[in-house]
Image (spheres, rainbow, N blue to C red):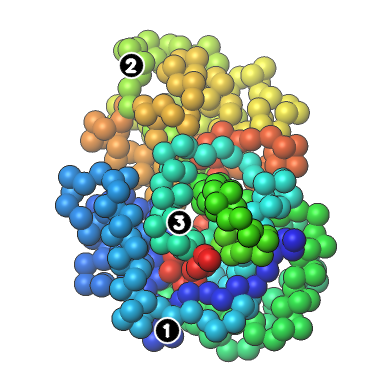
Amino acid sequence: MSLIKPFAGLRPIRERAEDVMAPPYDVLSREEAKQKVIGHPWSFLHVSRPEIDLPDEVDQYAPEVYTKAAEMLGSLRSDGILTSDPWPLYYVYRIWVDTHVQTGLMAVASVEAYDSGRIKRHELTRPEKEDDRVRQIDALNAQTGPVLLTYKADAALDRILATLAEAPPDVNTIAEGNVMHQLWLVTDRDTCDTITRTVDAMPSLYVADGHHRSAAASRVAAQRKAANPNHTGDESYNYFLSVMFADCDMHIFDYNRVVKDLNGLSQQEFLDKLEESFQVTPSPHPYRPACSGEFGMYLKGRWYRLALHSNRMATSDPVAKLDSSLLTDNLLDPILGIKDLRRDTRIDFVGGIRGRAGLEGPVDSGEMAVAFAVFPVTMDDLMAVADANEIMPPKSTWFEPKLADGLVSHLLD
């Protein structure tokens, strides 16, 4: 089985691409998604976040949510807004934001390679989120959110993609924030075969973002394989929608933490306990960590710099040395009593792209008690953890720019 293969994508007609494409389903709150679709009846958020078209009291995981998603996707297809390409192909996908540009390949990737560890993961998933994606795939009979993959820069593949992107793009759209998304359709069979062989020669691919989507695709594939007495391995459910970029093109932001309470401690008791592991210094401005072992903390309207004592810094273990692990091992667990970041409802996660407001807002509103800014993971960190078959703490990486939902979807058998 090939590591990747071409596929016949479901995508907007050219003149509606900008009307359809949307941010990934998991970067917006329900209310933010509702606001974004006002005046945008073809936004893919109607498919990826269908609860926005139901009463607010309907739970986001209720059965009618997935029924609504299928209804909205069906409407986009029957209205001629979305159409399927007539034969399998690859897509070159380029994203521009400011001076940053990254050019990658959209393909479907092998579930078998994912299950066997050749497509390597670095995070565990949160059960309720994984279950949600399984139900979404089953309801739509499609994968609509691409998994972001990365690979160690390969001169042969990068040269092919750069050459293909010299032609005028087949799709050229501008998203919010002046982010440009471009697609080139790779229709030449020989070129597609060359791409397949080039990627197959790579030792591995890495899941950068989309662990819930890839895990859900694996579960759906297993269920459908078990239910199909004529399973051959060629069925579309054996592959999942992905976009892959070279590691040198990827940009990781910080992924920060907010916690609802101080575990029964007063503010002063909490600060006193921090002194056991950190040098705690008030900061006159929002503190963004400058290096590993430093953290910013926002508590009761005030910022602090936390510097971990040197004797508490991990040195060799690729997971223990991550700043998300250092924060958990020295603060979240022993002081705030948060032992399972996947299931504990007292903690939430804020992508660094949301900036200062993303940390101060929840604390100032009283929704959260304290916020922590974390030094970002590097691509070397990510690959070292994956190559060691280890797992990062949940929500350790936030990649920007984000892939668009709705530009290309993968229909299942």
Left of 383 or right of it: where is 395?
A: left
For the residues carrying marks 1 and 3, which lies nearer the camera in this image?
3
The residue sitting at 69% across, 86% down in the picture is: 188
Q: CA distance from mark 2 to mark 3?
A: 45 Å
Q: In terms of depth relative to the viewer, which is nearer, 411 or 144? A: 411
Dot 2 or dot 3: first in sequence order is 3
Q: Amino acid at mark 3?
A: Ile
The residue sitting at 36% across, 16% down in the picture is: 263
Which quadrant of the structure image shows residue 271? top left
Q: CA distance from mark 1 to mark 3?
A: 22 Å
Residue bearing the label numbered 3: 137
Q: Helix or strand or loop: what does disc 3 sit on?
A: helix
Q: Give residue 308's position: percent from left, percent from top.
A: 58, 23
Q: Residues within 10 Å of mark 1 (few under 14, many from 20)?
A: some
Q: CA distance from mark 2 to mark 1?
A: 56 Å
Residue bearing the label numbered 2: 267
| Residue most extreme to the bottom | 168
Left of 238 or right of it: where is 203?
A: right
For the residues carrying marks 2 and 3, which lies nearer the camera in this image?
3
| Residue most extreme to the front | 229
Residue bearing the label numbered 1: 13
Q: Give residue 185's position: percent from left, percent from top.
A: 59, 82
